[in-house]
Amino acid sequence: MSPLFLFLSFVALLSALGVVLAKNPVHSVLFLILTFFTLSGHYLLLNAQFLAAVNIIVYAGAIMVLFLFVIMFLNLNEETEPHKPALAKFAAAIAGGSLLLILVAAMRNVNPVGYDPTSFDSQIGMVDRLGLVLFQQYALPFELASILLLAAMVGSVMLGKRETGERNF
């Protein structure tokens, strides 16, 4: 294992813990952005440059702006948050422990294998290969998804546009 992989894994685990343990929701979002950046570093180590770029642009960019907007809009603070009873905290601990138990039981018999250097294709995660596969084998689903997104965009504009005296719903 390379030292860069170990460093990125250490930072990813610490920032993921920071997401869960941070008292301030804005700090939690900032830790989540750091987690996304470290995961993008892992994607770069796996030679998946496109996936790393999309992860940074979509998740660390757009989704985090949306999260911050919702957090600021809701104005979350300790005074307005209702007190959680001890039973709810106990139930959450039981649910988390049982999830951990299920994950450990599922991963118990897994034997990870390395890669075979003779059959390893170093170009598998490159953008040009992804583009060829996307536009040759999956051209129809790609075009159908674009039509669906266009219809959703037109529908949202039509719902958002109001004439004087008109009620949509």
Image (cartoon, rainbow, N blue to C red):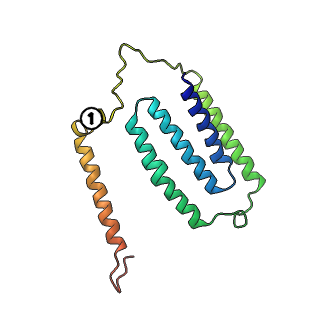
* Quadrant location, the N terminus: top right
Q: Residue at x 66, y 43 (%)?
A: 95
* Image x and y of residue 155, in percent: 32, 66
Q: Residue furthest front?
A: 3
Residue furthest to the bottom in view is: 165
Asked which quadrant contains residue 138, the reply is: top left
Q: Give the residue at x 26% y 44%.
A: 141
Total number of numbered discs in the rendering: 1
Q: Which residue is mark 1?
A: 133
Disc 1 is placed on an element classified as: helix
Residue 77, image x, y percentages = 68, 63
The amino acid at mark 1 is: Val
Give the vertical position of 69 relative to 104 (above or below).
below
Residue at figure coordinates x 51%, y 38% from the top left: 39
Relative depth, front residue between 128 and 91: 128
Pick the quarter of the image with the C terminus: bottom left
136 or 65, which is in the foreground?
A: 65
Give the residue furthest to the top. Answer: 118
30 left or right of 119 in image: right
Q: Residue 12: percent from the left, percent from the top? A: 58, 38
Can you give x and y, in whole percent of width and height, for residue 63 in the image? 48, 53
- How crowded is the residue under tag 1: few (<14 C-alpha within 10 Å), some, or many (20+)? few
In percent of the image, x 67 and y 56: which residue is there? Answer: 24
The single residue placed furthest to the right in the displayed view is 86
Q: Quadrant of residue 118?
A: top left
